[in-house]
Image: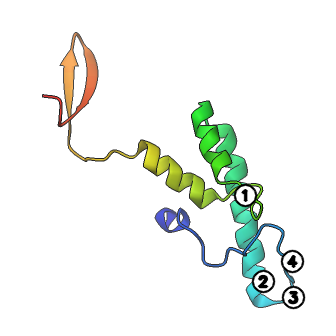
Amino acid sequence: MIQSRLGKENDLPASEAAVLNENVTADKKKIKTRERNSLGTVYLLPAFKSASDVSLAYETMSNEWPGGQAYEVINKLKEAYQPKDTEFYIVVRDGCRVRRSRHYR
């Protein structure tokens, strides 16, 4: 469920300022999707601790989407922080854990 929400939603309108009619069924979905996107970006920004993470969010802002797109922020965070390999070792030295990738033995 959550994984499906992290990707781009099909009902996202072409721009944040797109004029949508609440009486049209297809537009109702687009309105809800636009609101979810806005809430996603609003909740993501204060969660960032470093300026580099905030700059990732600013990179997603455009003329069409001045508030940014939440799914693009998530994709940029994955690129920056997701491990490239799944294999790693935990080394205990002097009671402290040190995480090392498989390239350090």
> Does residue 49 appear anywhere in the picture?
no
Label 2 environment density (alpha carbons within 10 Å; few <14, some 14–19, many ≥20):
some
**SS state under label 1:** loop
**Residue placed under numbered mark 1 in the picture:** 62
Which residue is drawn at the image coordinates 39% and 46% (left, top)? 82
26 left or right, relative to 17: left
Q: Secondary structure at mark 4?
A: loop
Nearest to N terminus: mark 4 or mark 2: 4
Q: Which residue is the site of mark 4?
A: 19
Residue picked out by circle 2: 27
Q: CA distance from mark 4 to mark 3?
A: 12 Å
* Mark 3 → mark 2, Cα distance in angstroms: 8 Å
State the image quarter where residue 39 is shown: bottom right
Foreground label between 4 and 3: 4
What residue is at 64 percent from the left and 49 percent from the top? 59
Cα separation, mark 4 vs mark 1, equals 18 Å
Is 18 in front, or is 44? Answer: 18
Percent position (x, y) of residue 96? 28, 16
Residue type at the position of mark 2: Asp
Which residue is under mark 3?
23
- Classed neighbour count for the residue bearing mark 1: other residues with Cα under 10 Å, few (<14), some (14–19), many (≥20): few
Q: Position of residue 37 (x, y in %)?
A: 69, 62
Q: CA distance from mark 1 to mark 3?
A: 28 Å
- The residue under label 4 is which amino acid type? Val
Where is residue 68? Give x, y as percent.
70, 56
Q: Amino acid at mark 1?
A: Ser
Question: Looking at the image, which residue is at 63% across and 40% down?
Answer: 55
